[in-house]
Amino acid sequence: MTQLTAPHIDYQGMAPLFALLGGSIVVLLASLLRSRFVHRTLVPALTVITLGAAIGLSIWNWEPGDTKPIVEGALAVDTLSLGISIVCYVAGIATVFLSLRSLALRTAGGGEYFTLMLGSIAGMNVLASAENLVVLFIGLELLSIPLYVLCATEMRKRVSLEAGLKYLVIGSVGSGTLLYGLAFVYGATGATDFSAISSAIGDKVSATDPMLLTGIALAATGLAFKCSIAPFHTWTPDVYQGAPTPVTAFMAVATKAAAFAVFLRLFVEAFPDVQPTWSNALAALAMVTIIVGNAAAIPQRSLKRILAWSGVAQAGYILTGVIVATQIGLQAMAFYIAVYLVMNMAAFAVVIARERVSPAGDDISSFEGLGRADPWLALPLTIAMLGLAGFPATAGFIGKFYLLRAAIDGGWDWLAIFIVIGSVISLGYYLKVVAAVWLGPTTVAVQPADGAAMRRLARVGGWSPEAEGRAQPEVLAVAVIMGAAVIVFGIVPSPLLNAAGDVGTALQNIFA
């Protein structure tokens, strides 16, 4: 009789994922209770507790320089996967607070809404840890499918349903392209584990094999869809604008973080012998992404669309860490993703506070004169814009400086020049928002909520802080905390730099 041996399960390594999956079940079951207290307070609190537990368990597993393979080597528990996962958990906690008064939460139901969000974060956890082609695709789908639904949770709004459908269709194209690419890679190498693929290249298959190169190109294209890298970014502005703003804020940060983590892990671990080929191709994409994202943001009036195009440009900056494929490149990428979290969340929190009370929604006219009406909202938005532009004394400046250093040290001087050029171009729209906030007229034209062509006048003096951010204290708190973090990490970046340094040890054996 054949003796079956049960696979070893590392419960410590899998603890954060177990916490997310278990917490999502608890949240869904709790939502079956009809009490208003349950839906308004208990369900969001359980979601925050779940994410807090996942953060604690990730810190418990934090061991710089140590990579722990789990699930028969299909997943890796290292500082890269843990660091990126923590970014996603923090983004999830912020999204819970931003969603408390959201129309999406009322129409979709709190239990379903937060369960979908936890499921997507679980997918991000799997994706950032993936060491196998099959697990990579499973993680990507677990991340994506809940987001398709979350984008359409404002079911009474056409734009929300349209955003969900667009993200579903284009996201499916991206997933299908990725799957084809992974299939070609498997066909060429006969392996699915990243380490086995790396060993097969140069041994079983040439680094110039057409099937292998086709697979790498298709895989890069599929991941580029998720990262909003040009020219595969076309879905981003429409989906970001149409989706519920808390969902947009979550997608803008967490999806990008997980996708870039697996992007780097796949290309550095599985395709090191093909690096001269794929690094040049990705550098060209990064250059195009930086220019297209920054140039397209300048004429926009919707702040959500501005942040969407900004996100495209930022993806070009972050891609530098993958292109360089060095330890300092990974550190720079990890640091920038972390500061991108706080800058974006601060900006989106202010957008949420304003669009809920302004008939102009997220149009720039909603923010004109905000500095006089409510400085507590104006300051975080201003700090976020300056940080995204890379002004000194902000975390964004340190992050871009770190990326420039990584590019130059890696021999990509011309790419560093494009990062600087892109940052200069970005002043055209970041400072436009800052000027509207602090120099806007006391009487501004506002688009009516019904979308009619006629415009009416609204006096800034009629705005009330009580009717603005202070009537939404949880949104104001997220804006202020995240805005403060942009300044704190810009002046005292050492704690975050140390954490990014730990993340850089995750793949040190390969970089060495």
Image: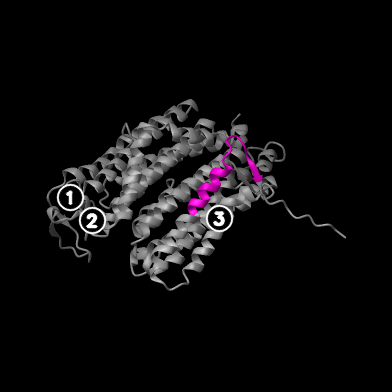
Residue sitting at 52 percent across and 61 percent down? Answer: 24
In contact (CB < 8 Å): disc 2 and disc 1: yes
The secondary element bearing badge 1 is classed as helix
Q: Is the residue 342 above or below the residue 512 in the image?
A: below
What's under tag 2, amino acid-wise? Glu
Q: Is residue 319 magenta?
A: no
Q: Where does the image place residue 317, in percent across and percent down from the top left?
A: 42, 38
Q: Residues within 10 Å of mark 3 (few under 14, many from 20)?
A: many
C-alpha distance separating marks 3 and 1: 43 Å
The secondary element bearing badge 2 is classed as loop
Residue sitting at 17 percent across and 50 percent down? Answer: 373
Q: Which residue is mark 2?
A: 468
Query: Which of the two labelled residues, at mark 3 and mark 1, occupies the earlier sequence position?
Result: 3
Q: Would residue 232 be visible to someone looking at this image?
A: no
What's under tag 1, amino acid-wise? Ala
Q: Which residue is mark 1?
A: 373
For the record, the magenta segment spans: 51-69
Apparent side of residue 85 relative to residue 449 in the rendered image (left or right): right
Q: Residues within 10 Å of mark 2 (few under 14, many from 20)?
A: many
Which residue reaches farthest bottom?
A: 34
Query: Which of the two labelled residues, at mark 2 and mark 1, occupies the earlier sequence position?
Result: 1
Q: Which residue is mark 3?
A: 19
Q: Would residue 80 be visible to someone looking at this image?
A: yes
Q: Where does the image place residue 167, in percent across and percent down from the top left?
A: 43, 59
Quadrant where the image shows the N terminus:
bottom right
The secondary element bearing badge 3 is classed as helix
Q: Is the residue 485 above or below the residue 157 in the image?
A: above
